[in-house]
Image: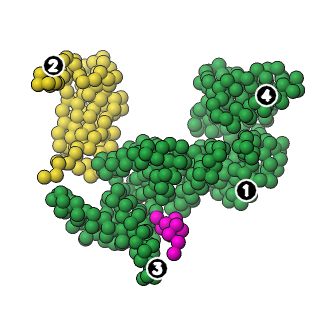
Amino acid sequence: MEYLLLIYGNEADVNNLSEAELGAIYQEFGGFTQSIVESKNFVAGQRLEDVATATTVRVRNGKRLVTDGPFAETREQLGGFYIIHAKDLDEALAIAERIPSARWGSIEVRPIAPPPPR
Amino acid sequence: MNLESLYREEWRRVLATTVRLTGDFDLSEEAAQDAFVAALEQWPRIGTPANPYAWLVSTARNRVVDQLRRRARFEDSEAEIAHLASLNESEFDLSEVAMVDDQLRLIFTCCHPALALDAQVALTLRTVCGLTTEEIARGFLIPVATMAQRLVRVKRKIRDARLPFAVPPKDRLAERLDGVMLVVYLVFTEGYAATSGKVWIRRQLCEEAIRLGRLLSELMPRNPELRALLALMLLHDSRRMARAGPDDEIITLEEQNRELWDRREIAEGVPLLESALREGATGQYALQAAIAALHARAQRAEDTDWPQIARLYGALLQEQPSPVVELNRAVAIAMAEGPSRGLALIDQLEAKGELAGYHLLPAARADLLRRDGRLREAVEAYRRALAFVSNDPERRYLNRRLAEVEGLQ
């Protein structure tokens, strides 16, 4: 079973960190990623640019609408994600709690839906 | 053959094992229900099987397999077909040990922290206790359709997010057991809080909670906190006949006719608590049970060991800081050392503002002022409490007190 781990956190807080602090966090994330690659749970994972770079697209009545910013403003912003293999929700939660930013942000764990029946 | 008593005895065990054998929560529930109906039809003809549990489980399991086969054919789904194949090979362990584990798995799944608390409560009552959706809805005074929806949604999450049907590993057990105990306790308090005309319906919730508490302490006999929770429920439940008058009016602990307390429940609860304390129970349920036991022990209200109760509330406050516990502690101190000490604590609590708009604070204040003979202030405090109170029996109680105090002035 695959789960999407959505990594939320307060961007402003992260942007206020010093180079050294940021470096330590990146290193910790690197170690975490390495560990779930080795345990064969890793499928994919990326860090996202700040939400200030987000653009939203909608098509209504055949007309494209492009707006600056995310779909909804929230206190915590989506900053990255992992896709993992896990045998059940408990294993997925145990991996999610090891993501370094779980200590200050939050991780939303979503099962990836199976393909629709043929 | 009485279906109801069979259902009572076997429902949970049959469902728990069927879920383990098939891995499908939703289908198992339907199938288990069908199995009971089949038993009712067939047993009068073929005779009651030697092992009713085994008969019901294999009937339910076969129903699930039929369902899955139909679904697999319809959807031509490889996953379903593979699942079916593994089912046919799966071992069929119906031993006593496996049965205990199955029931624990079922309870831990229903009380999984990934599920909303109200959903945990509803699901536990539905699947572990075997209550109908209608009964649960009535117990919680919400529409049947709302409850049915809640159950559908929670079962969908169990399936789609793949919640494990498992007893948590050792390093998580204490934390997960806290969740289970909270669910049991919520079922109990929901039933116990009611003094309304629907007493007989909500009474069922108390009985189910006690039954769950018994089951859990049988399944995990070495856990003293579980035993303390069972003791707490028994000791509170023992006062049920004494705590409301014929018109649902509130009768305070002090005014209760202690002859009406259920001596059997007290006789069961006190030793349970004592053994739990001996084995190191220190949690909130143990402390609350110890307070209840001190009340149970007092022959008359004036025999109550208030200094000890005040100390226990102090310990409870450490364990679980809350303004309501603080208020209770203030009252206990007032009873132990005189109203003025308690009133000073209540004033401090009021100044913090955490209980603003909560009628029990001015009500407790009024009560202590009345005991202290400060009648004019008591009248004022009762009036303030009346301004905040929202439920009818409590309003009538406060009005009665107000009238008494006004009469004395």
Is disc 4 on the same chain as disc 3? yes
Which numbered disc, 1 or 4, marks the residue that appears first in the sequence? 1
Pointers 1 and 3 in contact (CB under 8 A)? no
Q: Where residue B402 is drawn, which disc sits there?
A: 4
Q: Which chain is yellow?
A: A
* Number of other residues with Cα within 10 Å of mark 4, as a class: few under 14, some 14 to 19, many 20 or more: many
Between the residue at mark 3 and the residue at mark 2, the CA separation in whole angstroms equals 71 Å
Q: Where residue B66 is drawn, which disc sits there?
A: none
Reading the image, the residue beneath label 2 is A66
* Kind of residue indicated by mark 1: Asp
- Determine whether, in the image, residue B122 is placed left or right of residue A67: right
Of the residues tagged 1 and 4, which is closer to the observer?
Answer: 4
Decide which of B100, B9 is in the foreground and name it.
Answer: B9
Determine the residue located farthest toward the right in the rendered image: B408
> Residue, x 66% and y 22% (percent of image)?
B350
Q: Position of residue B229 (x, y in %)?
A: 59, 51
Magenta highlight range: B1-11
Q: Is residue B380 visible?
A: yes
Membership of A87 in magenta stretch? no
Decide which of B390, B325 is in the foreground and name it.
Answer: B390
Reading the image, the residue beneath label 1 is B262
Between the residue at mark 2 and the residue at mark 4, the CA separation in whole angstroms equals 66 Å
Q: Position of residue B287 (x, y in %)?
A: 64, 44
- Determine whether, in the image, residue B343 is placed left or right of residue A106: right
Q: Which chain is green?
A: B
Of the residues tagged 3 and 2, which is closer to the observer?
Answer: 3
Between the residue at mark 1 and the residue at mark 4, the CA separation in whole angstroms equals 31 Å
